[in-house]
Image (tube, rainbow, N blue to C red):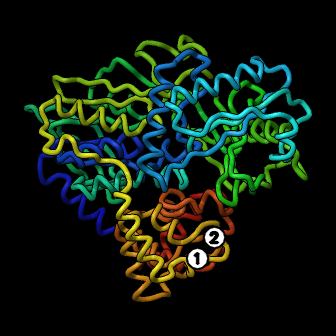
Amino acid sequence: MKLRHSNIQKLDQDIHDVLIIGGGINGAVAAAALSGKGAKVALIEQRDFAGFTSQQSSNLAWGGIKYLESHEYGLVRKLCLSRNQLIENYPSRVKEIRFYSTIEQGFRFSPLFLWLGTWVYWLFGSGFTQTPRWLTRKAVNAEEPVIDTGNFCGGFEYSDAYLHDNDSRFVFQFVRSAMDRGCIAANYVASLGARFESGCWVTDARDVLTGTKLEIRSRVLINAAGPFVDDHNKLTGETTEHRHLFSKGIHLIVPRITRNHKILTFFADDGRLFFVIPMGVRTCIGTTDSRVDSPFTEVTDHDRKFVLDNINKRLNLAKPLTKTDIIAERCGVRPLVVKTGISGADAGDWLQMSRKHEIDVNRDKAHLSIFGGKLTDCINVGDEVAEIVSGLGIRLPHPEYKWYGEPHPSVREEYIHQARLMNLDGYTSPDSIESLSSRLWRRYDQQAFELLAEIREDPRQAEVLIKGTDYIRCEIRLARHQEMIIKLEDFLRRRSKIALVVRHEDIRHAEGLMEACEILFGDQAKEKYDEYFQELPQ
């Protein structure tokens, strides 16, 4: 809370080089890139960081194999290289994973043709991942007996990547990186529109929590408001070459379906790729793809039925999955980029529309609008924004600075050495699926040294605080000071993925949750607890 209060006080005290509207993935990487290269950056987000579209993804960093069908070879090549870059630079957060795909009789392509396509895909990725493999019915039955092979006509296995933690934490780590390099970022601050005066942008903003109004001045204004880019451009009077259409996608979180750490891939009844994604002790299944007119969406009974019917049809389960098996749901829109003036009816095959990004620039007013995009391509977005901003006359003192990636391997080696010396993994909860040393490094990288120091001083800090989760006491203390947690949902849904893997009622009654609230919110603990459980469905 103190960090946010301090940053809000700084927002209107000076003229920033750049103000970024939006704290999703596009805004987060723009802030990280520009701050790292030396610009004076501010960022505001009307909700929590990654509090809308960027928290509803499949948690995949993939090269877009489906775009081969629409012949977007340049996009596939670019996304594959972006995926490789993420795997290389975030070895603890983004990991290669095998996609285990089975094809049914009567599908529009033969499995052999699709298998050859996976080799093309592998080559587009410069052979960075493991090679594809052909699957026979016998192999599938032996390796993944949960798959129903009654209608099987062939299969294959290939590689892409996934985020080990949830997408919203991945986004926040870019925001945290930007703040470490001088960015003034604040969540729950809304832009009410901006005007260009005397060579400077003046943005009217409002603290959503207190109602306090601010005027934030910047030389460059970046609209990275995700699905609300068009809305914000209307507020500022900006006209652009591109605009957004929206596609709704949902995922259901259910108990673990298979212990094999692979993503099961099918083609759903509507012809769309359909995933069964491992999520620790849970499984994430989906997704749907339906046109919507508004970014505000919800999971319908029809959506649930579609996903459950498709999964039950293709798996050998002891009993079919039903609505009672659903632990949590994810629902969001994909902002799809089209030329201004093109309607949804004229946009072509909806299922084939890609997630490529576009950046429209008004050079006369130093205004950028970022359309589309996805997690996989985030580093490219950050680099492109920095190049454009530099071209608008903003001096970047450190243009060659590498603003992304985990700390140098030597830093991790020192961390692991210290962790071994104090037998950190001896504190790992028996219920955890990974060692404590590995988990703390992935979530906090260099800040994990602070946690080691706290545990050395007081071993109680290594105790799991919220029963049914793997979060230890000192993590909650660090989150209070470093992660700008304003509401309990910010912690349960975005800084962690507790709300995605633990049932709502189990969270409500979890031992230690109130103590965690007291650490996070002090005297407001009961208020924040009640706010969370009153706002969410019972």
Q: What distance separates the C-alpha of mark 1 from that of mark 2?
A: 7 Å
Left or right: 122 as drawn, with respect to 280:
left
Q: Secondary structure at mark 1?
A: loop
Quarter of the view holding residue 129? top right
> Badge 2: few (under 14), some or many (20 or more) residues near its Cα, within 10 Å?
some
Q: Which residue is mark 1?
A: 428
381 over 184 or under it: above or below: above
- The residue that appears at 54% across and 69% down in the rendered structure is 530
Q: Furthest residue to the left? A: 198
Q: In this rendered view, identify the residue nearer to me: 325 or 210.
A: 325
Question: Is 499 drawn above or below residue 329 in the view shown?
Answer: below
- In this rendering, position of residue 28 left or right of residue 252: left
Q: x%, y% of residue 88? A: 44, 46
Asked if residue 480 can be seen in this view, the reply is no
Dot 1 and dot 2 residues touching (CB under 8 Å): yes
Q: Is residue 202 in view?
A: yes
Identity of the residue drawn at 49% across and 53% down: 93
- Residue 450's tag is none
Which quarter of the rendered picture does the N terminus lie within? bottom left
Going by the numbered disc 1, the residue's amino acid type is Thr
Residue 16 image position (x, y, % from top left): 16, 46
Does dot 2 land on a helix, a strand or a loop?
Answer: loop
Residue 454 falls in image quadrant: bottom left
For residue 256, above or below residue 242: below
Specify few, some or many for label 1: CA neighbours under 10 Å numbering under 14, 14-19, or 20 or more. Answer: many
In the rendered image, which residue does mark 2 sit on?
432
> Where residue 308 appears, x then y in whole percent?
79, 42
Residue shown at the point (14%, 37%) measured from the top left: 219
Quarter containing the C terminus: bottom right
Of 427 and 157, nearer the camera is 157
Q: What amino acid is at disc 2?
A: Ser
Q: Position of residue 450 (x, y in %)?
A: 36, 75
